[in-house]
Image (cartoon, rainbow, N blue to C red):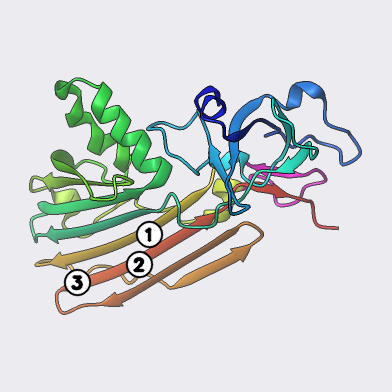
Amino acid sequence: YAVARLAGADACLVRANALVRDGAGEPPEAADYAMELVTVALPDGASLWYDPGLEGGIVDHVRSGLRGRPALLAGCGRTQRQVVVPGFGVGRDRRAVSIDLNWHADGAVQGRVTETMHGATAAFVGQWLADAPPSEHSKLPAQLASGAFPGLELTLAGTRQLEDDATLEVTYTVTGKADAARTHALDLGLYPSEVGKTYAVLQQRSTTMSFGFAQDVDIRLTVHSSGAVPAPVAAARGDCPLLSWRRSASQTVDGVAVAFSLRAEAGAVAPAL
């Protein structure tokens, strides 16, 4: 903000309200507008946004929990004081995961995973790689996989910042020794089996529910089997306010290919009347 003002730009501080209060009639309190952003007016009438809370200093990007939220302008001469933080659209923080696994008759597993991250996700992981000592980098695959490969060893193979500096590619290997428990079934936790319960614990609500964290994930899994035939995966889909997901699968010559996608936008969902 200070740099933009010194340069003569029309910059404003933005105090955003990230909260969704229970009870539709309750007005917001002054303390609710606690999240600070910066917006700069451009000559063509558009606005540039900056979120100091984002890792990596991404310009024209804000955290998912602040998108579409009411905000107040301060520290500038604009007559309009109440604004809404832009949504910035789907795909800005997309995470694409490609998994290729070889599943052997004795239960051994070898494979490779490539994760391609964009936007805030790439900036956060990139900043962690820059700050953490090299000896800690080996922990990154387990942090990204988050229990997706139970009983298997994950080894970092490499990281690569792509040309636009807003995309990060992380590659790691997946290995598992022969195991009788895996000879007939390969259990993976790549995506939730019941997506709705991940976001809404209750079947019915009388108050507004807040989505504070957006997700935009595409997973492509290919399993090559030299032993048991992989169990069929049923196709399914779901469409709800702020949330949609798809799952499809097909048998291949030597196994199965599964595709899963999840789009969850930050925002508030009113109870059904």
229 and 224: which one is in front? 224
**Residue at 14% across, 66% down:** 225
Relative to 184, is 78 above or below? above
Q: Around disc 1, counting alpha carbons within 10 Å, would you say few (fewer than 14), some (14 to 19), or many (20 or more)?
A: some
- Residue type indicated by callout 1: Asp
Please, what secondary structure does the residue beneath circle 3 have?
strand
**Residue at 54% across, 57% down:** 89
Q: Which residue is mark 1?
A: 218
- Residue type indicated by callout 2: Ala
Image quarter hosting the N terminus:
top right
- Marks 1/3: CA distance? 20 Å
Q: Position of residue 70 (x, y in %)?
A: 73, 40
The tag earlier along the polypeptide, 1 or 2, is 1
Q: Position of residue 21 (x, y in %)?
A: 78, 34
- Contact (Cβ within 8 Å) of mark 1 with mark 2: yes
Whether residue 241 is visible to the viewer of this picture, yes or no, is: yes
Q: Which residue is mark 3?
A: 255
- Marks 2/3: CA distance? 14 Å
- Marks 1/2: CA distance? 8 Å
Please, what secondary structure does the residue beneath circle 2 have?
strand
Residue 259: image tag: 2
Q: Quadrant of residue 37?
A: top right
Q: Quadrant of residue 33?
A: top right
Q: Around disc 3, counting alpha carbons within 10 Å, would you say few (fewer than 14), some (14 to 19), or many (20 or more)?
A: many
**Residue at 25% across, 30% down:** 129
Secondary structure mostly seen in the magenta stretch: loop
**Residue at 17% across, 30% down:** 138
Whether residue 212 is visible to the viewer of this picture, yes or no, is: no
**Which region of the structure is painted magenta?**
200-212
